[in-house]
Amino acid sequence: MKLRLLVLFMVLCLCCGFQHGKPALTRWVITSGCSLKVDGSTNVNNFSCVIANYSRPDTIMVVKGGKPFVQLNGHIKLDVQQFDCHNPVMTADLRKTLKSKEHPYLVIRFVSINKYPENGTRQAFTKGMVHIELAGVSKQFEVAYKVVAADRGVLNLVGSQQVNFSDFNIAPPRKLGGMIKTNNELNVVFDLKIKVIE
């Protein structure tokens, strides 16, 4: 009798454990109005280049539960030729520096986020891991996120991270025989509009 009760107790514990530990799957559908901005500087001035109105209907799979972080699986793929630095010469230089002919896309692959935005929270800050692929080189970075809840089921996810040209084996561009030198550091900011589908 005791053996039967023990077996029954273990089965109940296992069943309850599976129910509580079952990951919850959510989809983040990227909608129109997204953008990516790169801010940099030279020894003469600052510059800002942007890919505006990114609107490919990409989907990021979100797995909540089972780990101390939230798993993400998805990516955005941006056309390097769409960069606009608001100056034709600078735009052409950036596209050439990023080897746009050989490697036409900048890809951001989403790996994880430390904390899922809670329902009812208007604004939150967290961090997460991404892989950035540029000029044929992929590097992992920890990105700082600001998450803003808009209408019901809609999130605005803004990620920012400093990267270097040298992270991707790229030499910063120089002009006028080296008199104008671009600094190695760049600040990358991507702004995603997301529809949450439970």
Image: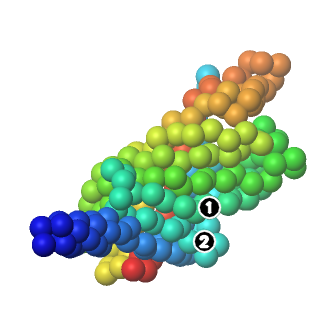
In the rendered image, residue 124, in percent from the top left (x then y), is placed at 27, 56
Q: Which residue sits at x=57%, y=40%?
A: 140
* Residue at x 47%, y 41% (from the top left corner): 142
Kind of residue indicated by mark 1: Ile
Residue at x 71%, y 44% (from the top left corner):
134
- What amino acid is found at the position of numbered circle 2 in the picture? Asp
Q: Residues within 10 Å of mark 1 (few under 14, many from 20)?
A: many
Marks 1 and 2, the one that precedes in the sequence: 2
Left of 26 or right of it: where is 42?
Answer: right
Residue located 53% across and 67% down the image? 60
- Tags 1 and 2 in contact by the CB under 8 Å rule? yes
Residue sticking out furthest to the right: 101
Estimate the x, y position of residue 62 in percent, counting from the top left.
45, 66
Q: Which mark is residue 58?
A: 2
Using the image, determine if residue 132 lies above or below residue 155. Answer: above
Q: Position of residue 7 (x, y in %)?
A: 23, 68
| 107 sits to left or right of 197 | right
